[in-house]
Image: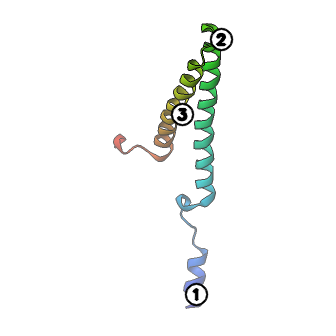
């Protein structure tokens, strides 16, 4: 009985079950989404200054950044997790 317990403890755990990997994924997804939204904000500020200071461009830039971030996260997940449609 002791030998079975020692053998099961010595087996490597599945790499997909690693909490550090999950934390890394969450960090990458969050950074990607926030980065795209910040870039959209600055794009909106830039366009707002060109067009005379209308704040609607800033809101539009942030929303554009949000959608770009979501699309980027989808491609990121497909790339690293594998797309079932590739088979």
Q: What element carries label 3?
A: helix
Q: Which of 51 and 34 is in front in this view?
A: 51
**Alpha carbon of mark 2 to alpha carbon of mark 1: how far?**
72 Å
Going from N to C along the chain, the mark reached first, 2 or 3, is 2
The circle drawn on residue 3 is 1
Label 1 Cα crowd, 10 Å radius (few <14 / some 14-19 / many 20+): few
Q: Give above or below for 54 relative to 87.
A: above
| On-image quarter of the C terminus | top left
Residue drawn at 57 percent across, 27 percent down: 62
Circles 2 and 1, Cβ within 8 Å, touching? The answer is no
The circle drawn on residue 49 is 2
Query: In which image quadrant can residue 12 be found?
Result: bottom right
The circle drawn on residue 69 is 3
Between tags 2 and 3, which lies in front?
Answer: 2
**Alpha carbon of mark 2 to alpha carbon of mark 3: how far?**
24 Å
Residue drawn at 57 percent across, 80 percent down: 7
Between tags 3 and 1, which lies in front?
Answer: 3
Q: What element carries label 2?
A: helix
| On-image quarter of the N terminus | bottom right
Q: Residue furthest top?
A: 51
**Alpha carbon of mark 3 to alpha carbon of mark 1: how far?**
51 Å
């Amino acid at each position: 009985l002791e030998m079975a317990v020692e053998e099961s403890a010595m087996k490597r755990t599945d790499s997909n079950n690693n909490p550090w990997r999950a934390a890394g994924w969450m960090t990458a997804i969050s950074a990607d989404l926030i980065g795209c939204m910040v870039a959209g904000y600055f794009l909106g500020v830039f366009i707002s200054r060109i067009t005379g200071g209308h704040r609607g461009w800033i809101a539009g830039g942030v929303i554009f950044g949000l959608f770009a971030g979501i699309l980027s996260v989808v491609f990121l997940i497909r790339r690293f997790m594998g797309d079932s449609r590739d088979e």
